[in-house]
Image (tube, grey):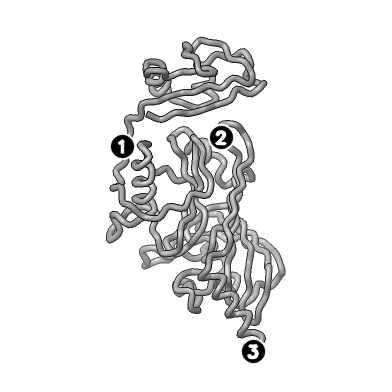
Amino acid sequence: MRRLDYQIPTEYEGKEVGWILRYVLRLSKTKVKRAKFAPNGLLLDGQAVRSNQPVTAGQLLQVSIPEQEDSAIVPTPGPVDIRYEDDWLLVAEKPAGLSVHPGPGHYTDTLGNYLTWHYQQQGQPFVLRLVNRLDKGTSGLLVAAKSAAVQEALMRQLHTERFRRQYLAICQGNPPEREGTVDLPIGKRPGTLNEYQVRPDGLEARTDYRVLERQGDRCLLSLTLHTGRTHQIRVHLAALGCPLAGDAIYGGSGPPGRPALHSCKVELFHPINGGLISVESPLPEDLRTFWAESTEKCYQ
């Protein structure tokens, strides 16, 4: 059983509970029906109500929904770092080197496995519904929805100004300008399974960059994505002549042992109440150490 709490705002004064369920909380007809027939499935200020009950601004609507969804992901105990959570969505921190989805060679040791276990221990059903994605070697913030309807609403925001994703990167070399935009199409590299390149017949891809610090032949960049192509930042920085440190596939070298890329900030508008959610994550220890060592080396 999953319970949703929603305080009625002024603009929905006089609307019926059923209308709120369908068009504000975005519950399917099936889930509305389950809530109506569940014990205490619909409560308004703690009192049982029917779906045709008009609401008043400030009232608390509580909806209990028997979930009938099963996750195909095997629950496995493991570390989970949730930076934001409510009834509708969560923002989790993914460490570098951890896959998100189970796959060949990693069926039980992924973020999906750990999150499924985490919610199972709380007695909550959980299906992994990602909104944005990170490569295995990239660390940082991931957004996941707790229902199909919320995932759909957030996916409509993705790649718009309502859903902003910011990254920190340590690069080899220096961009030609202190800030700018890389607007180059990206497509699959012929003859490879999972490598990409700039190519005229590729998909549109746009990345903003800004130099935060320069130390010798390395720089610390802030990057904002406007599109979400696979390996977009890695390919764009390589095309700019300053590949990510540690990214051997696209011409980078250095000791991080993974591409020096971190998803440091996500901002989105809540799909239910419309409020702005902003979550930040500092540069992780391995990249902080690498940058500090780069700085020390520069001054030796």
Q: Residues within 10 Å of mark 3 (few under 14, many from 20)?
A: few
Tag 1, which secondary structure?
Answer: loop
Mark 3 highlights which residue? 300
Q: CA distance from mark 3 to mark 1?
A: 58 Å
Mark 2 highlights which residue? 271
Residue 29 sits in which quadrant? top left
Check the picture and name the quadrant holding the C terminus: bottom right
Percent across and percent down for residue 199 are 51, 63
Image height of 24 relative to 44, above or below = below
- Residue at 50% across, 55% down: 229
| Residue 225 in view here | no
- Residue 70: which disc? 1
Tag 3, which secondary structure?
Answer: loop
Tag 2, which secondary structure?
Answer: loop
N-term-proximal mark, 3 vs 1: 1
| Residue 39 in view here | yes
Q: CA distance from mark 2 to mark 3?
A: 51 Å
